[in-house]
Image (cartoon, rainbow, N blue to C red):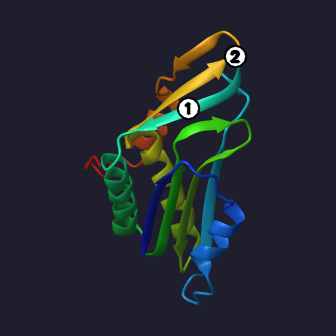
Amino acid sequence: MITIKVQTAPFDPGELTNSVHAGDAAIGALVCFTGYVRDFNQQQTVQGLFLEHFPGMTEKSLQRIAELAGERWPLQAVHVVHRVGQLELAEPIVFVAAASAHRQDAFEACAFIMDYLKTRAPFWKKEHTAAGSHWVEGRFSDLEAADRWADDQESP
């Protein structure tokens, strides 16, 4: 089962974790990642950020990334929630959960989804700092992380 949500509303990572498992006895491992708004980036103090997306295209892209994970690993569930709009410090931005019978599959699938999400999903981030606001460029380190899955040549 794949669940994809792009929303402006805050979410509770603990509640999401419990909802993914929901007593499913086939799930032996559930690996979750939650990304938060932090107060720094590249030697600048961040006061908040704004996330823009392309409605419809973003959800399709996230769906395809989750499907690619399901083609690589035997997964019972994938759950992705990504916030857009104005976000304040310490708020959760993204939640990714990968559920499988075995931990290694869940760990790898969760890492794969995050690496692909960071490099291939259509999101644009504007940081607000004391010096003003600016759009954030992608990081080379994120591209390198996604390259470890290079035997999958399809681009979501």
Name the residue at 57% across, 87% down: 24
| Spot occupied by residue 109 in the image (x, y as percentages of width and height) | 48, 61
Q: Tell me whether the residue at label 2 lies in contact with that at label 1, contact meaning CB atoms closer than 8 angstroms.
A: no
Q: Residue furthest top?
A: 131
Rate crowding at label 1 as few (under 14), some (14 to 19) or many (20 or more) other CA atoms within 10 Å: some
Q: As shown in the figure, which amino acid type bears the numbered disc 2? A: Gln
**Depth-wise, is mark 2 or mark 1 nearer the camera?**
1
- Vertical placement of residue 38 versus 40, above or below: below
Q: Which quarter of the image is occupied by the N terminus? A: bottom left
| Spot occupied by residue 75 in the image (x, y as percentages of width and height) | 45, 74
| Spot occupied by residue 73 in the image (x, y as percentages of width and height) | 42, 69
The residue tagged 1 is 50
Residue 44 vs residue 109: left or right?
Answer: right
Name the residue at 63% across, 22% down: 128
Q: Which mark is residue 43?
A: 2
Rate crowding at label 2 as few (under 14), some (14 to 19) or many (20 or more) other CA atoms within 10 Å: few
Q: As shown in the figure, which amino acid type bears the numbered disc 1? A: Phe
